[in-house]
Each structure stands twice: as structure tokens, then as C-alpha cells.
Image (tube, grey):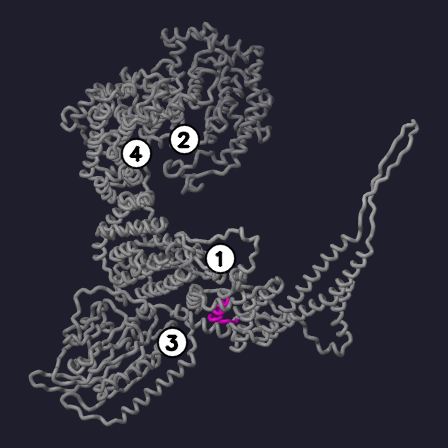
Amino acid sequence: MAEVARPKKPRQTAKGQDKKKKGTTDIKKKENSRPEPELNQELISSQPTKVEFSTVGHKSQNEAVSKPNTEEQSEDYQLLPTSMVAEVPVEILHEPELCTKTASIAIDESDFDSKQLIALDGEQKQFQLNQTKLNSDKSSNLHQQVSENIKVTEALGLPCSSKTASDDSKQNVSVIEPTVYGSSVDHENISSQKGGVNKKEKETIVRKDKKNPAILILGEREVVGMDLQKPVVNLPVQLTFARLYPDLPIEDKRDSRTASVKQVSPHFQTLYPEVPCESEIVPFSKEELKIFALGSWIENVDTYTEEFLSVANQDKNDLYELLMNYGRCRKQLQLAAAEQQTMICNYISIEQRLWTFKEEQLTIQGVCADQAKVSAYYRFQTVEMNNLVLGELKRALDIKADHLHQTMALHAYTSVVSRLQVESYIYRLLNNSPTFRAVAVLQKQVNQELDCSYSDLQLLKESISVLFSFTRRIIEDNQFHSDILLWLQKLVAVLHSVGSSADLLFLLNHVLRCPAGASKWAAPFIQIEVFNNSAGIFLFMQALALLLSPIKFRSEFLMNMKPCDQKSQSTPTEKGVQNWTLVDEAGEEDEDPDTSWLLLSEDDLIILLSQFPFDELFKQLLGITIKGEYCPEKSTCHQMMKIIGFASSLVEILALGLETFNRARYRQLVKRIGQMIRRTICYVSDHWAQFSTFHKEHGVEMDQFYSLEKLQVEFDELFLRAVLHVLKAKRLGIWLFMSEMPFETLSKQMIWKLFYILHCVECENIEGLCAKLHSDECKIKLKDPEHKEKFEQCLSNITSSEGICLLTTFAHMTHSKKENVDQEFVKIVALEIYEVAYVSPSTRESFSKVGRELLATISTAHPHAISILLDRVQETIDKVGMVSLYLFKELPLHLWKITSAEMSVIRGWLLNHNLSTAENKLACIILEGLNWGLDEQQTKLALDPSLHTEVALMVLEAYQKYLTDKPYSGFISESLKQVSYLANVVRLTQTPEALFNHWAWELVIRLKLRSNCPCSDQGWPTSNNSFTAPEMNESPALHPLFKAVKSGIPIGCYLALSMTSIGHSVDMFCSEGISLLEVLVQSKYLKAVVHVLDEILPIFYPCQYYLLKNEQFLSSLQLFLQADSVVPQGMTQQMTHRVAQHLIGISYGENIKLLNSMIQTHLVESSKPGRVGIADVLEFWIQVFTNQHLWHRDKTVMFLMDNLCKTAFLHQQEDCLQKTLYQQHKHALGYHSDRGLLTSFMSWMIAGNITPSFVEGNATATEVWFSWIIFNMEAIFEEDSQLRRYMELELINNSSFTPDQALKKAQSHLKLPVVPSIQRLMIYRWAHQALVTPSDHPLLPLIWQKFFVLYLRRPGPEFGLPVSGCIGKRYFHSTSHSTLLKEMKKRLVEIADFHHEAGKALRIWKKGHSSEDASSADENLVIQRPESMTSPELHRELLRLFHVFTFWLEDINLQKNDLYLPSLPVQYDAHRLAKVMQNQQDLWTEYVDSERIKHELHETTNLWIQLHSALSVTYRTSSFNNSNPLSAKDQIYNDLKTRNVPVPAVPLQRVKAPVPDIVCSSLTDKKAAIELVWHYLNILQQQAK
């Protein structure tokens, strides 16, 4: 710990101590010389009793935990004043006046020394107490004298002596006889928080007929506590003792050495009062807590101020006279310079009158050669010199020259000489002292601490004081002011090097008495280092107390800065100027303008406060090493108490700053001080949380001095004091920090106490109120209606910002540890905020918004508070009305576990009130906000499954009541035209019925009604699922549902499919469910249809033929696909989208996207083990989509098919789709004698159109995945029909054949039923598709691969012919096809440019993952996945590939027969080119961006997963601080990182002699003399030029 500097003892005090000692000696001699009276031998012997007043050895806090006999000593040992022994004969005790006088002098004698802080010498003090023991026997009345010597091996003391509070009349009546004690005390029998003594170890005999002498017995005392091993017997006279140390109430102690006793009252008939069984732990007072601090910081401010004042005034100092002379010289020089400037101005004005300018004009006329008369004009100026002005100008120049050479030169010289005198004085000051010389003049590297004499240091401080005094003057000369600061910085830098801790306080005192703005140059003077400094903490705390205390005598120091009276200087022109007055938030003037100039500016104080390294202080306080090691669990109870005590002293100092700067002009400073108070409490709270948690969890035995209960009480008191200090600073904005206090570590009793205190913020004597409060009393008063009215009136009186901070504090107080939640407190706070924000007329306008947010915050941490609010809203719904809707919209209803009783309340609101009432709307909001999905762990339903069923039937009943009997057929009618729909959308969405219809459907869709195992994948059959769905006809509870289904109500049909056996059985769905599904489709509730399909289809995938053969089911799905793009929906959520959709021409809506997401989810789920597999799901949907006529022209179907093809490619299931499409393609071409299909396509051939294809046109840029599947299927058909084989043969055999001729020749040879058109050849199909495919599409490299396999193909060996050249070029001989080839070359360049630019971009990953996780991204798509962006590495690979493609396409030599592949350059990629020419069909999948494909599919499935999980809101955590001890440690580290960096100290500059000393040899040596004057002669020569 830091070493504490012992202040000097004032001389007057020392003299007083000598007088006291002398008086005490005289009394002793006088009393010892008196003869001893005869005493009754039965009572006591004639020997006098010797009483020793020994000192108390205060050991360090670290040693207080160890054994008493430890030999190791700590640096922060403190010892009380020297032992003082007063021998008081027994006879004196019978004389009250003399005894009182003797005891008072004896104790007062050590009063001053008890306050001194000195080091413990380490010797174990021993003292012997000769005590007479008396034993009385009632039967024999015999008394026997017993003496005993007690040796104690530990430093002992008397912290406090009892003061008998009895009247003089009772002193001779009630006499307590001495108690007989044994020489040893049983340690196990002495315990209790009040320090009582076991009754079995004492005997008390009261004798009223005889007077016995009082015997004072002293016992051992622990380090901090006051504890007497022997009781103090009441003296027969009243003694007045001065207190060496304050009383310390000691809590539970299990050692005999720590036993304590209560003060004995004369009213007791026994020596000790009876100790209660359970006593309340009393916290230490402020005076008692000072034991744990290193000093009385605030009390020492006056001492250091007086010491500063003794050296601050140095107007008789030599330096002062030199500076005054320098200032006068500078002033004379400035006046001369000003006069010189006046002369210059006068010269300029005279010069302007020297010359007189006139404008002249000449006219010249003449005759030209052509006899024409001409004339010309010439204008010029003439100047005339004024001789009188010339003489005046000469006189002005003479006066100016005389002034310059005489006056200016003289004052400049005297100014320079005066400055040299000052610098010479400073140099001599630093050069004459060996210490200063080593530091400033020689600048030696001194490793050890410098020893500076007191006189030298005093001279340095006096010089600094003189320089500071000139900074408190109005100085208009900037040069003089800068010189003062320069010299001041030099001397302060020296003082920093050689000075002590008190010297920093000396500098700070000076800075605080400087004018406003001094922090700009004085901030570096304040340097405090806590680490590696034995007096660092002492220096920090004392300097902080000095900074935040009122600055005494500041006006006297700034008497030369007082501004002149401006009223006398006001001119008539200033009468119209408006004077503005600064007022605070409450409208009151903050300060007096006449005295405001004396105050320091806020920026000055903030900069000075920033010089204090609070982070280092807190690290030292919490035991964090310089390396950052922090182990709070290793702290002891004594160390924890020390932290609390020190934090209490720090808070007291900061609170002094709040009181000192309680002005509106210091608003930001006060906020910083309030923040430091909050940080102090937070650090202690986090440390205490970790400490207490570790001791509780690990069951650490509390064998130390303080228990956890005692420490909790002390922390509570620290917290309370901090809050009280913050409450005093009103209208300054620091109440905000009160709301950020760590309330979670407080005890329940203190929480209640604080809550009540915050209700009484307007009370004047709030501290007195705190001393009388108890938690039970607070609870009673808080429930008092009158008290609530007073609090509401208080909120209306204070400012709105303070009211918000107060309510925010209430909300934060509800946060506590999970095992320490006070449900009653949460209830009363929630109701309090609700009353203020919504019920009270005087406050709800100001606090409704913040009240809503705070109640949401409380409910997030304590969801049961919603039940409390629901009950209160039910009682006050008439007063609150519609405002309650905003409240419950903000509440975290998804965390609430609603009960059946609360559900009955909501049911009454929903069914018994109209749609436009607040009750009905509130019921809808509550039901909508509940979490109908899984809980936060995603393991089970958040709410009971029975509630899902109950709510579904409740909504059905309300739907039938409010909508069934209403004429809303137009709302869901099939015959509604598109134009009328667009006109009615806006009108329909505003009606209560339309809103309720939308709400009802959204809610029932979110309900989990299908099975009782929602945690598993809903709808997918499992082997262990024993759930049996109820029959709609057999269950009485489902009778309303039965009626709704019979009536054809769509919502009833949906519930029947979700809840009953109709949606759980294959047979029943085929017989009854499909008709209900058709009702939903016809009613246009398409979102509900998607949910039904999601639940039904998993049980039909293994037996899909039941649905594929059902015409009613297929027609319903076809109607669904058509309805989403042309017909309005029943759910108004999609209405605005419908409007936009029709205006911009989108061909599919949100429900189609939802269906696509559901299908993709089924594909993923089917691939899991034990499921049907992806192939069956793909086959089912391909059959459904291709069932309708001309399906390939339907954009909706094409969108769904494209996504199916993408999934099939990713999972390598393309054959499944190609098989079905291949058969349909052959049917379209008439290969299976299906003349119906053939006839439908005959018009194509007759009209000369191209061959029919599922991809109409040459290619498609939107459904690229679908085109990929179709083109591969057509390529298979081209191979199977041998069409391309025979075309190639014809082209080889006949070099003059065109592709058209070869095609016709092959068709006639193969006798194909349909003649294929030339455009349908696959080489052209791949070429066109490569042109229109987007540059970033994953399939683009494979499409170009397919093209080059055909373009660079070398046929021949398969026909038994030798290998010939490539024939791909022959496909592009025609004009149209040659243009296509040019476009392809251009397209390759564009694609290469795209990948070149894209390769420069950075890869974006999801939050929480880095690029290092990319390798495992394929394994888990949900946990870690990149954004939809191809990696730069892949872009660079694709860039190289498309460069290769460009070479392949442009180089005609590749088409020749004599090509030698190994001779090709590297850019051609000969290895890959060989594979292409050999017709290898293996796809280059390494160029496919599989990550992007997975990302897109994940985004698609995520749309359905989010909707299916019914998470209307995301899980949010409480905004309160986490009370986890681990997070508390992290919080400490994070807070310590955020700090203001102090301004560094002034660098120490080397001081040189202003006038170098002349070497003696220069007086005799000519050469040395020349060298000496040569430099100065050159300077004079330069000046002469």
C-alpha cells in the first residue's frame, strides 16, 4: 500500500501538549503525596490499583486475517500514539471531581497523537494488569481478595471508554460491586453480533449497603473492532473520557478475542444487559469507515491550503521585483511602439497632402492629305508639390527618427536587460543547488531518488509562486505572458523531478487560483501516478479532494483580474443592445454576473479532472496487477471490507464535488462526477458479486473477521450513500447515472429502502429519513394511497427529464439475481409505473411513452409482470381505454406463460365486446403477441398444447359471431373483377370486420394444432408417434367446428384439416379433406392452403398416386396456381402487394413464393434418414406441375419448376426430372402414337414453325436451371434418335453440305415422324443460352462447356473413319449463324471483365463468422454460411477459364486436322482442350459456385421456417446488465479500457546560462580573447549593415 505522509505538528499544538503533560504530572505528584485513607479490609486491600492506558496497534488489513503471532509486517501498519500510563489510586476513585479531572487530562493527552499516522515498529507490546478480584458470599458475607496477572502477546488498546450517563444524585446510590472473573475465557462461549458475554462465565453481585471501588479491566482488541475481553465496571463517579478511536460495532465473531460488550447503563441491575438471540447487523458509521481509508482527505484540505497560503504570497521576493521591472520595461516598450505607430500614421497622412494632382487636356487639330479636318484629345495629369507640407513632413520624419533611435532603442535595451536579469536569477537558482544543477543544468541520468534540501526546495516553490502571481494579472503583452509561462514550465518540470507528493498539491492549489482558461497551459502541471508510487493513492485522493472542494481565497488571489464597472463605460449607442440572462432548466437565474468572473470555467475543471488516472486507482483498488491479472475470488473478507471503505471515502470526495459545483454552468462537469460515482459503485458491485458468488458456491469457511452478511450490509450502505449524494444534485442531469446503478447486487431490504427513499426525493431531511427507515415500514408506507398521491404530485413538480430518470431507476431496481427475485417488489414497481404512465391524469401525458418502454423492460426480465398488468388493466380499462393497446404491443408477450384464468378474461373481452371496443382489440393484440411456436430452447411448445386448441375454437366462435352473418360475400367472392378489386382494396382494409378477418386467419395459421409432438418435424410420420387425432363428429368440444364445416365456413374447414382426423388419415383426407381443401382454394385463402399442404403431403409422399390420380386435388392445385396472380386474397396482409403486383406486371405473388419455400423445405426434410427421399418429392411435384395443359407457358409454374431444377442439380437428382420430361417431350413429338397430342402440334409444322419445345424461343434468361434440365433432356433425345450422329457423318462425307442439308439427309435416313428444325440443334441451343445467361449465374461455365464440347468435337473414329478436324465451324457458315458467333466472342469478353472486377471485392460473411469458417460451410448451412457472394478466388479461376474459352473460339487453327495439342501455349489449357475434343461429358463442377446455390436455397427454405415457427418477435434479452460473475469480470475490463488519456507532463529542458561566464584565460591570452569577441562582433556588424 501507499506510504502515508505524516503532516507536521503545529507549534501551537505542541506547546499545548507540553502544558497538558505538565499539568498531568503535577496532579500525579499531588495525589501521590497525599496519605492513603483507611479502608475496610473486608472490601479491598490497601494497595492502590494501577490502570494502564495502552496504545492500540492497528495492523494492516492483510495481517488482520492471519494469526496474531505472525512476524511479518506490512507497509501500511499504523500505530496509535505512544503508550500513556496513568496511575490512579483507589482512594481517588471516591472523589468524583478529582477522578474526573485526572481521567480527562490523561485521555486528552493522547488526543492529538492519536490522529498521527506512523509506522509500526513491529515489536510485540506487553503489558501487565494488576487486578484485584473480589468474591462475595451471601451466606457468610466473606470477601477475599484475589490478584491475577494477565500477559497478552499482541498489541492491545482501549478504543473507547464507557461514559456513565447517570445523574449526580444517583452516583452514591447505585453501586455495582466488582465481578469476579477467571484468568481464562472459553472461546466458544463468546459470540454474537453485539459482542455479548456468556452468562455462564460471569457472576454479578449487587450490594446496596456497601460501597466498593471500581476496577477498570482492559482486554484484547482486534485490528478494527472494539472488543474488551474483560467487562468495564461502572465507576462510582462520572468519568469523562476523550475518544481515542470511534466505536466500531462488531458483528458475529467466533473468537474470544473479538468479544465486545454494550455500554452499561445505570438503570440495569446487572453488569451486562441481556443479549438478544438474533440481532440486526449495524453498518459502520462514516467515522468508523475512516479506519479503512489512508487519511482524512476532506479534513486535510484546510491544512494543505494553509500551508499553501504561507508560501503563495511572495511580493517581497527578488524574483518578484525583477519580474515587475521586466513588466514595466515591456510596458514602456509597448507604449513607445504605440507612439511610433502613431507617428507612422501621421507621416502617411502628411504624405498624402504633399502632392496636388490636376487633370489636364490638350486639343490638337489638323488636315489630312485628303483635305479632311481631324482633331485629337490628349489627357494627362499634372502634379504640384506643397512646400509647407514638405517642411511639415521633414519635421515628422525627424521626430520619428529621434523617437526610434532614442526612446525605442532605450526601452528595447532595458527590456532585454530585464529579461536577462530574470533568466540569470532562474539560472542561479537552479545552478546553486546541487540537486537542481544535476537535474536541470547538467541533466544527469539519476537512477536513485534525489535528496533535495528543504531550503532549496522552498526557494524553488517561492519562485513558482511568484510566476503564478503574474498569471493572475491582466497582461496585454503577449511576449511578457509567454515568457512567464515559459519560465513557469521550466521550474515546474524541475519540481516534478525533485519534489514530493505535497508539492503536487502546492501546484494544484496555484492552478485552482488562476483565472479561467488556465487549464490550457497548466494541465501538464498536474501529474499523478498511482502505480509504482508508494504515495500514489494518497496523492490521488488528496488532490481530488482539493480539486472538488470550494476554493478558498480565490477572490483575493484574483483581485487584479476584477473587471471594471461597465455601467460607467456604457455609451448612448449601447442602449439599444439587449442583455440576455442565462437561466437553468427550472427558469431560475444560475449565478450572479458580478461574481461569475471569479469562477473557473467548466472546461478547466473537466481538463483538470481528466488528469486523474481513475483507471489506475480502480486497478489498485480491485487488486489488478500491471499485467492485467485479476483474481477476485482470492480476496479475503478483510480486503473486501477495505475496498468498500475506500470506495466510501472516494464517493464522499466526489459527492463534495457535486455540492461544490452545483451550478448550471458546470452541468457537464457534474455529469462526469456523477459518472465517476456510478463507475465506483459498479466496480465495487462487480467485485462483490464475484467475491460473494465464489464463497457461496465453493462453501468457503468464513473464519475471517467479517461475514458475508456484514459485507452485504456495508455494501448496501455504500450504495445508499452514493444514491443520496446523486439525489442532491437536482436539475443537472446526473440522475441518469442513478438509473444505471448496479441494483442487482443489493439486498432485498436495501432495495425496498431505496425505493421508498426515491419516492421522497423532495423531502428536505432525506438523510434523517434514511436513518429511521426499515424495510417492513417501507412496504407499508409504499402501499398507502396518500403516499402514492404525494409521489404523483412530486413527479409533476420535478422536470420531465428527472422524472424519466426516476422511473427508469425504478425499472432497473427490479433486476436482481435469479435466486434473489422479490416478486412483491416487482409487482409494486410495475403497478407504480403503470399508475404514473396511464392512470394518473397529472402525469400520464408526460410519462406514457417512457412508461411503456420501462414496463416492457421489466416484463422482459420478469414475464410474470404481464399478469399483474393484465389484472390492473382489467380494473382500469375504462380510464385507460385505447392507450392500453400501445402498452401491450410493446410488452414481450412471447415470454409470457398465460394461465387458464387469464385466458378466460381474454375470452370475455373477445366474445362479449364489439370489434371496435378497446377490450376486443386488446384481446386480439394479446393473442397475437403470444408465442405459439417453440420455446427458446426449441425443444417444446412455449404454451400448453391445450391452449392452442382452446384459442382455435375461441377464434372460430368469434369469427362466426362477427363475420358469418355479415354480407361479406363480395369480400371473398370468386366473381370479383380485377378492376373492382383494385378499387375496393383500400376501402375493405379500413373496416373492423376486414381487420378482424385478417387477424383471425393469421392467428389460426400460427397455432400448432396438428399433433402433440410439435418439437419434431410436424407432419412427417414417425414410428413412435402414438397420437390419435380426435374425430370431429365424436368429440363434444368440437361441435362448433362441426357446425362451421357443415356451413362451409373456410376457417372451419382449415381447423378441421388441422385438428381432426381428416387431416391425419390418408383415407379420410381423400374422402372428406380434399373437398375442404377445395373450399379454401375457392375462397382464395391461399396461405392457409399452403399450410394444409405442408401438414398433409408428408403422409402422401410414400403413396402419392392417391393424390396424382385424384382430379379434384389436381384441379384445386391448378386453381391455386392461377388464383395467386389474378384474384384477390382473403387476407388483407397481401392486398397492398396485390396492388403493386398488378401495376408492375409480376406474374406470381407471395403465396407462390410461400409454396416454393414449403416445397424446398420438404425436399430438405425428405433427405433425412428414415424419410422417403428427395426423388419421390421431386417426382410428385413434377407430376403435379406438368399435369395441366401448356404448363411451360405459365410463368408461375416455370418459377416453381426452375427452383425444383436447382435443387435437383444440387442433390444430383437431375435424372428424376429428365425421366418425366423426356416422356412428355416424346409425347409432344408423337413418338407414342398419341395423336391427340400430335394433332395439337400439327399447326406448328404446317405453319413452318420450329419444333415444339418446353423452352420456347432460343433460350431463356430467367429460368436458367429449367433450361439446363430441358436442354440436357433434348440432348439425350438427340443422341437416342441418332440425329446428330448422322448429321456429322453427312458433314464429314460431303464437305459442301450445309447444316440444313445434312439435317434433311439425316431425317430422311432415320425416317423421323417429325422433322426437327435447324434452330433446335443442341449446338445452337447451348450457344443462345450462353449469350443470355447472367454473368454471375453458377451454371454459366457448364453451359459454355456444353457448347465447346459440340463446337470442338472431332468425329470420325465412331464411323470407322480417320480423325478429321473439328466440324463446329461449319455450323456457323451462314450469315445469321456467323453473327451469332461474333456475339459469343463479344460476350466472352464481357464475362471476363465482370469476373475481373468481381475478383477485387471482399467476401462478406455473416456476423460472428470469419472467412476461416468457409471450409466447413458445406457441412452446416444454418450455423455458418457466407452472404450471397462468390469468393474472389473463384472469380479469379473463372476469369482464367473464360480467357481460355476466348482463345478456343477465336483461334481457327483449332479446327484444323493437323493440330498438335502439346505445342499450344499455356493460355489454351491443352489438357482441358483435349478432353473437350475427345467428347468427354464430365462436368467441370469445380467452377460452379455451390456455396451460392446453397445460400439461395437456404434463404428460400428460411422463409417457410420462420413463418412456420410462428415467431412474430425474436427472442430478446433484458436490457438490464447481466449479473453473471464472469460477465462482471469482463465488464470491469471493458470499463477500464474506456478512459481519458491525461495530458503528459512538461518535458524537462536543459537550462543554460543566459550570459556565459568569461574564462579567466581570455584576459591574458590574445587568441582566446579574439575568439570570445569574434562572434559578438559579427552580430554587431550584421546589425550595422
Question: Which of label 1 and label 2 is nearer to you?
Answer: 1
Q: Is residue 1522 visible?
A: no
Tag 1 and tag 2, C-beta contact below 8 Å: no
Name which of mark 4 and mark 2 comes first in the sequence.
2
Tag 3 and tag 1, C-beta contact below 8 Å: no
- Please indicate whether residue 16 sits to the left or right of residue 392 in the image: left
Please name the residue shown 56% across and 10% down the image: 1297
List the residue tagged with mark 1: 603
Question: Which of label 3 and label 1 is nearer to you?
Answer: 1
Instruction: Give the CA separation, mark 4 to mark 2.
Output: 20 Å
Question: Which of label 4 and label 3 is nearer to you?
Answer: 3
Instruction: Give the CA separation, mark 1 to mark 2.
Output: 56 Å
Tag 4 and tag 3, C-beta contact below 8 Å: no
Name which of mark 3 and mark 1 comes first in the sequence.
3
Q: Considering only vertical position in the picture, is 1571 above or below 1294? A: below
Quarter of the view holding residue 417: bottom right
Q: Give coordinates of residue 235: x percent, y percent.
A: 21, 81
Residue range of the region highlighted in magenta in the rendering: 498-510
What is the crowding at mark 2: few (fewer than 14 residues within 10 Å), some, or many (at least 20)?
some
User: Residue 506 magenta-drawn?
Assistant: yes
List the residue tagged with mark 3: 116
